[in-house]
């Protein structure tokens, strides 16, 4: 867990945040032990901004690693940040039991913070 928090912290400097000034860093670990990081990437069309968590997830999945087990999330404020609703849903797709490590040492389980999630079961 500390290793993941450290990886997320290291990524903070790469955040692209000219509008909010907030840097968010995420690091995730797959069941095979691979680690991917991601940062928030803002855009002058504010709605196109992408969160750190989804950048990390898309990096992992685009390399064929869908077996996400845990993520760590940090922010430049030093305060713990929680994944936004959109990122919770994207993470849920791959593993409802994903562990979410926060910078205050607490660990959450995704399905506990996204009850009644929309899932693939609803499609058939
Ligand atoms: N942000 C994330 O990267 N992850 C979240 O879960 C919530 C918010 C970023 C997006 C934006 O660049 C900045 O934080 C302020 O919303």
Image: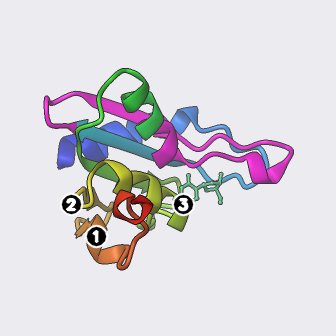
Contact (CB < 8 A) between labels 2 and 1? yes
First in residue order: circle 2 vs circle 1: 2
As drawn, 102 above or below 54: below
Residue holding disc 2: 97
Single out the residue that lies furthest toward the right.
Answer: 44
> In the shown orientation, is residue 40 left or right of residue 60?
right
In the drawing, what numbered circle is on residue 86? Answer: 3
38 is within the stretch colored magenta: yes
- Tell me the distance, in whole angstroms, between the alpha carbons under discs 2 and 1: 6 Å
Q: How is the image coloured?
A: rainbow
Using the image as rendered, state which of residue 63 and residue 76 is in the foreground.
63
- Quadrant where the C terminus sits is bottom left
- Tell me the distance, in whole angstroms, between the alpha carbons under discs 3 and 2: 17 Å
Q: Residue at x 73, y 55 (%)?
A: 20
69 is within the stretch colored magenta: no
Could you say which quadrant of the image residue 74 lies in? bottom left
- Tell me the distance, in whole angstroms, between the alpha carbons under discs 1 and 3: 14 Å
Q: Which residues are magenta?
A: 30-56
> In the shown orientation, is residue 119 left or right of residue 33?
right
Q: Badge 1, how many Cα within 10 Å: few under 14, some, many 20+?
A: some
Using the image as rendered, state which of residue 15 and residue 65 is in the foreground.
65
Provide residue 22's location: percent of width, then percent of height.
63, 54
> In the shown orientation, is residue 90 left or right of residue 23?
left
Q: How many marks are shown on the rendered structure?
A: 3
């Amino acid at each position: 867990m500390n290793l993941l928090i450290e990886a997320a912290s290291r990524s903070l400097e790469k955040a692209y945040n000219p509008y909010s000034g907030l840097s968010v860093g995420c690091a995730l670990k797959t069941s095979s032990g691979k680690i991917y990081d991601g940062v928030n990437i803002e855009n002058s069309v504010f709605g196109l901004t992408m969160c750190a968590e989804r950048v990390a997830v898309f990096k992992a999945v685009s390399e064929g690693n869908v077996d996400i087990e845990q993520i760590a999330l940090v922010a430049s404020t030093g305060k713990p940040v929680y994944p936004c609703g959109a990122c919770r849903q994207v993470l849920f797709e791959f593993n409802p039991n994903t562990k979410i490590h926060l910078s205050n040492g607490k660990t959450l389980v995704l399905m506990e913070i996204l009850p009644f999630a929309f899932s693939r079961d609803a499609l058939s």
